[in-house]
Amino acid sequence: MEQKTKVAAEEGKQEIIITRMFDLPVELVFKAYTTADLIEQWMGNKVLKMENKAHGSYQFETKDASGNILFRANGVIHEYIPNEQITRTFEMENTGFPVQLEYLSFTQEGEEQSKLTMQIIFKSVADRDNLLKMPFASGINMAHNQLQKVMIQLN
């Protein structure tokens, strides 16, 4: 089955371009990326901090049943334009991956459809390629499928 979230990585470049069309108005997709309880529902991470503003920050984590931290990520929000744009850093703690820069663009595409475009810039081509060796593309597709499902229930 073809994945709805498209991940494009041009050879020799330090970036990934991710695009996804949602059967949702842009306001709901933006809300899914900026509201703690919604993020927890579609990403499966606990939101420890969410400051939606320029120079704000965020932090997510996932623990196993014993309370051990499996995943923790954080970043700083540099630009925040409701329903249009978020520019932020993203750091996966306790991994070999350096901080990356993310540009998230939200656009309305018709009455009940919207498009998310994410440009992720890595410190090096090697860092980008190492991420792509992981099940990154299938993981983000599954998360976006869950986002669609959660937000349709609110619409």
Image: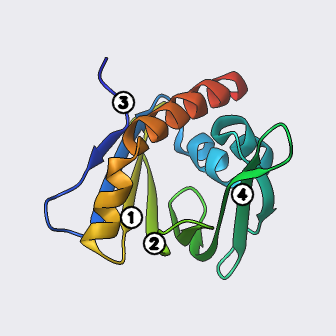
Amino acid under label 4?
Phe
Snapshot quadrant of residue 48: bottom right
Q: Is residue 32 above or below residue 17?
A: above
Amino acid under label 1?
Ile
- Kindly report which numbered mark, 4 or 3, lies closer to the viewer in this rendering: 4
Residue at figure coordinates x 72%, y 57% from the top left: 60
Could you say which is closer to the camera, residue 97 or residue 116?
A: 97
Tell me: 3 left or right of 60.
left
- The number of numbered discs placed on residues in the rendered structure image is 4
* Mark-to-mark CA distance, 2 and 1: 7 Å
Q: Tell me whether the residue at label 2 lies in contact with that at label 1, contact meaning CB atoms closer than 8 angstroms.
A: yes
Q: Which residue is mark 2?
A: 100
Instruction: Identify the element where label 1 is drawn.
Output: strand
Quadrant placement of the C terminus = top right
Q: Which residue is mark 4?
A: 60
Within 10 angstroms of label 2, few (less than 14), some, or many (20 or more) residues?
many
Sequence-wise, the earlier of marks 4 and 3 is 3
* Mark-to-mark CA distance, 4 and 2: 16 Å
Sequence-wise, the earlier of marks 4 and 2 is 4
Q: Which residue is mark 3?
A: 4
Q: Tell me whether the residue at label 4 lies in contact with that at label 2, contact meaning CB atoms closer than 8 angstroms.
A: no
Residue positioned most to the top: 1
As drawn, the label of residue 120 is: 1
As drawn, the label of residue 26 is: none
Where is residue 24 drawn, in percent x and y?
53, 32
* Mark-to-mark CA distance, 1 and 3: 18 Å
Where is residue 84 drawn, in percent x and y?
50, 60
Tell me: 106 left or right of 90.
left
